[in-house]
Amino acid sequence: MSQHPNSFPKLHNAAWPGVVGKGDDDANPIIPLDEMLDLTAAAEVDGRKFDGVDLFLFSPHVSIDADDEELEALAEKVRSRSLNIGTVVAPVWEPTGGGSAGGSPEEVDAFLKQVRKGCEIGKKLRELGVRPYGCIRLDSAMGVADWVKDPEANQSKIADTFKAASDIAEEYDERLAAEGEICWGGMQSWRKMVDLLERVGHPERFGFQADMAHTLLYLLGYNAPEDAILPQDFDWSDEAKKAAALKELTHALRPWTIDFHVAQNDATVHGTGSHDKTGRHCLPNDPNGKLDIAKDAGYWLRDEHGDVLQTCKHICWDGCMFPNDVMHKPETWNDILAAMLSVQDAHGWNE
């Protein structure tokens, strides 16, 4: 028997680390999509390779306004490297043409316009045969500082916007996944995220994207101390308390989870622009990492009885903000692929 006997969930790398946080200094220019695809396709562990990539619909990788010819060329780029496309990120934020989901009518219209464009691209990539699974990822595009000025009104407004986005997704037979990241208003804690999901109330179209790095910070209550499960000075050597906290968190959010990011986190935060106190991703083997990646992924990928859920047909590595010299090393991606395989080995299946 192969030492990696499972074929699902499929293993994806993220292309957006080539764009996010890049271009601000000469040492870390944007890494082109072709190069990110090559780095992904070259990785290999025990004869296994990445199955695909998740994409950011943002130039210069993939324009949210890409036409059919550009999407056909994208499909060929991916297909020629024996990869698939999974979840795609819609650029719903104001600087990229969108607007706040809790903002003015004009901002909401801009937000929904980006969602529609993302769904249209997602559908076309499915029709081109390179996207067999995956969601359209979004968030509230509203900072926590703005949200707390009027929590109830803003939460209601965001929920209404997400309901309208769900109606758009239905037109294209797509699903929307809201990323649980603590920098976004209305989504900055696990309780607020559950509240928002319940208010939207469209589980067939609107669900949760769990990122292991970001959801670890849900436990600590950064940006929402009232919802903390663990103290911010928690002793991470206390495995029993950590396990109990993860069980409480995943019990609440796992029923909504339709997309999953494998990641590592050292339980610290940093902020860049609108990303206020967001998670600091680490390499999978970082000695400061607080997650046991394969074990802790199981809190999300198995149900209360320990049975594999098979809800997420693919999982994605979401490490980003690494320096380019790290990202250009083949061993970086081999180590990441090995971590992904450990999750598939522990919680995977065959079809």
Image (cartoon, rainbow, N blue to C red):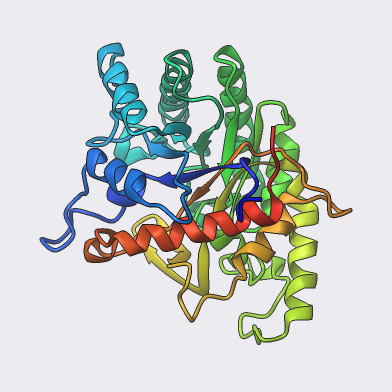
Q: Foreground residue, 148 or 75?
A: 75
Q: Is residue 7 above or below residue 213?
A: above
| Residue 87 in picture, x, y percent from top left | 49, 35
Q: Is residue 63 left or right of residue 276?
A: left
In the figure, residue 222 lies in which quadrant?
A: bottom right
Residue at image x 57%, y 22%?
A: 174
Q: Residue at x 24, y 38 (%)?
A: 34
**Image location (x, y in percent) of residue 71:** 31, 19
Residue 145 appears in the rendering: no
In percent of width and height, residue 99 lies at 41, 35
In the figure, is residue 211 to the left or right of 206?
A: left
Viewport quadrant of the C terminus:
top right
The residue most toward the right is: 305
* Res. 91 in view: yes
Question: Going 74% across and 48% down the picture, which residue do you hit?
Answer: 254
Instruction: Give the mark count.
Output: 0
Q: Nearer the viewer, residue 106 or 162?
A: 162
Q: Is residue 4 left or right of residue 15?
A: right
Q: Answer above or below: position of 273 versus 76.
A: below
Q: Quadrant of residue 120?
A: top left
Question: Picture coordinates of residue 234 (x, y %)?
Answer: 65, 84
Q: Residue furthest left?
A: 26
Q: Residue at x 66, y 87 (%)?
A: 235
Q: Residue furthest front?
A: 1
